[in-house]
Amino acid sequence: MPTFTTADDVALTYSDRGGRGVPLVMLHGWGQTRAMFHHQLDGLDRRVITLDQRGHGESAKPHHGYRIARLAQDLHEFLDHLGVEEVDLLGWSMGVSVCWSYLDQRGSARVRRLVAVDQPAAVAAVPWMSRTEQQQCGAIFDVAGLVALGGELAGEKGEAALEDFVRSMFSGEPKPDVWEFVRQEIRSTPAYAGVPLLFDHCAQDWRDVLPRVDVPTLVLGCDGSHVAPSSQEYIADQIPDARLHVFSADEARSHFPFLENPERFNAVVEEFLGATS
């Protein structure tokens, strides 16, 4: 697989499935890999580019840079490396946070469209948010719960804690092949990378960024996800003219709709991105 090296000397691995039209760059979530999007790499009718972010997958795992802002800088440098003037961005989970951070820091001059898949506006329910604000954001943890999870992930039983955490992102019993694939992929990120990145990711509050997203945006949620669909409705309301699609429970029932029902997921994304010719 091709690689590129960031300004702080980190080699990142990516896949580039050539094709027509504006390239679609896809960013995976925390602890995941670019392989999560194998159904999209092969199934979308356009040029699709997937990236293992630092500390993940086949990319290098240095002992520095595990912050959303640094991952957004990696994205900026990656687009420079590709030599592309215009892209569509699709972020899933933490990957959405990277996209929002990129837009916050760099603006949208290079971005044609954005697809935001199943990411809360703020993951941690901090004490200065009202209960209503916490619910609107889709907060998953309180601060104590986030700290406790980090301690478990960094501890002697970290692998079991990681599996339990990711398994909670499915409603009911996932398909065995889907769960086994996810379970194998999440093993690539070491705790020294994953724990500080998770803490930084969950500490972000993107509510002030949402009204300033000035590109056409599709927000995707899922009825069976651990991320409340109501939080995706809130995000779509905050981003000017954003579209919203929530996958129903008979389409997908997890944080991973692109794995559970790739045909439907791809169709929804293709319809939003438009023709490639």
Image: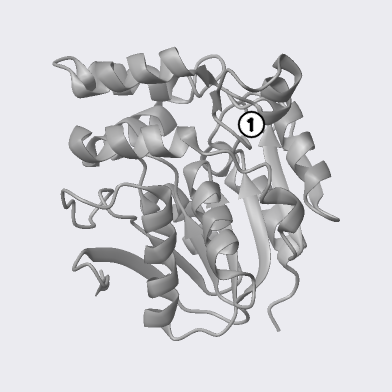
Q: How many marks?
A: 1
Q: Residue at x 42, y 49 (%)?
A: 68
* 145 to 90, vertically: above or below: above
Please tell me in which quadrant of the rendered image residue 225 appears: top right
Quadrant that contains the C terminus: bottom right
Image spot of residue 26 (x, y percent): 50, 59
28 left or right, relative to 186: right
In front: 262, or 53? 53
* 182 to 258, vertically: above or below: above
Image spot of residue 28 (x, y percent): 44, 49
| Residue type beneath disc 1 | Ala
Name the residue tied to disc 1: 252
In front: 42, or 77? 77
Please tell me in which quadrant of the rendered image residue 196 appears: top left
Local crowd size for mark 1, using a 10 Å CA cut-off: few (<14), some (14–19), many (≥20): many
Quadrant that contains the N terminus: bottom left
178 left or right, relative to 136: left
Please tell me in which quadrant of the rendered image residue 99 appears: bottom right
Q: Residue at x 72, y 36 (%)?
A: 232
